[in-house]
Image: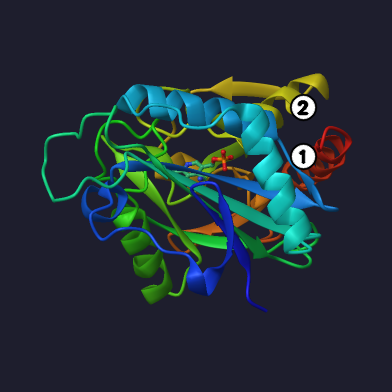
């Protein structure tokens, strides 16, 4: 099926959608993005994604070209036009397309940001739980990982390194401590306590992370925000990751070491159920 996508105010068949070769997203990765999941035809955690988008744009000095109300409307219209029951909405805003390639930012009065959204249908998204295996790799990304930019070459290479090693994903290590997965926030569980790295510029401030930690505390689970090493993770009772597209996903093997019985852990399984139930209640 040909998707209907959104480009700068227009809904178009994907085959007719075009952006300039001078777009700064294309030439300089000068763009930010968000991915919002859809369950039962409704948007999960839309407000959180809209807030983080504003923050990312602000950190890069890109003028916000669209109000949150209009953004919600575009998301909903794409869900409707593409008949999405379960899936994802990808949104990207770049600094725009000046008439040439230049490192210097264009004048924002003359060049407006490029706004692109498209849907990805993922039937069975809520049900697809895969016990994940991960490898560890060095984290050589830039220092502002809190900004959700489209500079995803290294995370993409990380996934390929994982694939080449027969694993599903890679956890990145900096100064001896795990930062995050290639496209997710990571957690270990030891003696019932959930341990995850604290927020800083070193990791993306996951929207799913924020919700899951809140639900964990509401369910009287103990949470400790601190860094951990890969060895500590290998000795944990269980591990998992969170992301908008994976919700809460169990991790059962780290650099070849099987955690516990090699099955999805109790804490991850429970948090996944709570997260999906609660998110559906507040879906828009
Ligand atoms: N960290 C990184 C590096 C990511 O790319 C993502 C997903 N985009 C996350 C964490 C998880 O964030 P969220 O829960 O908002 O999807």
Residue at point 27%, 33% (across, down): 110
Element type at mark 1: helix
**Position in image of residue 277 (x %, y %):** 87, 41
The correct choice, above or below, for 86 with respect to 108 in the image is below
Q: Is residue 183 visible?
A: yes
**Position in image of residue 231 (x %, y %):** 42, 44
Residue closest to the eye, 261 or 59? 59
Q: Is disc 2 in contact with disc 1, using a CB cutoff of under 8 Å? A: yes
Residue closest to the eye, 15 or 190? 15
The correct choice, above or below, for 250 with respect to 200 in the image is below
Residue at point 79%, 63% (across, down): 83
Residue 188, numbered circle: none
**Position in image of residue 177 (x %, y %):** 35, 36
Residue closest to the eye, 52 or 144? 52
Task: Estimate the spatial distance between the alpha carbons at disc 2 and disc 1, rounded to whole Å.
Answer: 8 Å
Residue at point 49%, 26% (across, down): 54
Tag 2 residue: 215
């Amino acid at each position: 099926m040909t998707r209907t996508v959104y480009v700068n105010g227009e809904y178009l068949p994907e085959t007719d959608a075009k952006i300039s070769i001078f777009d700064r997203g294309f030439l300089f990765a000068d763009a930010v993005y968000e991915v919002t999941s859809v369950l039962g035809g409704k948007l999960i955690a839309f407000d959180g994604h809209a807030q983080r988008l504003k923050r990312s744009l602000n950190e890069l000095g890109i003028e916000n070209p669209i109000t949150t109300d209009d953004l919600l409307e575009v998301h909903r219209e794409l869900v409707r036009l593409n008949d999405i029951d379960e899936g994802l909405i990808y949104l990207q805003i770049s600094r725009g397309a000046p008439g040439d390639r230049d490192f210097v930012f264009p004048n924002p009065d003359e060049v407006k940001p490029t706004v692109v959204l498209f849907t990805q249908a993922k039937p069975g998204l809520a049900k697809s739980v895969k016990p994940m295996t991960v490898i560890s790799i060095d984290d050589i990304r830039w220092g502002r990982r809190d900004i959700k930019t489209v500079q995803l070459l290294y995370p993409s290479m990380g996934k390929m390194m994982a694939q080449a090693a027969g694993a599903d994903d890679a956890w990145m290590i900096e100064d001896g401590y795990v930062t995050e997965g290639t496209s997710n926030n990571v957690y270990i569980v030891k003696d019932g306590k959930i341990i995850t790295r604290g927020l800083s510029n070193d990791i993306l401030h996951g929207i799913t992370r924020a919700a899951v930690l809140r639900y964990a505390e509401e369910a009287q689970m103990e949470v400790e925000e601190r860094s951990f090493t890969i060895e500590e993770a290998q000795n944990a009772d269980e591990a998992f990751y969170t992301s908008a597209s994976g919700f809460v996903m169990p991790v059962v093997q780290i650099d070849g070491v099987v955690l516990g019985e090699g099955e999805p852990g109790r804490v991850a399984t429970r948090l996944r159920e709570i997260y999906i139930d609660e998110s559906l209640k507040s879906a828009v």
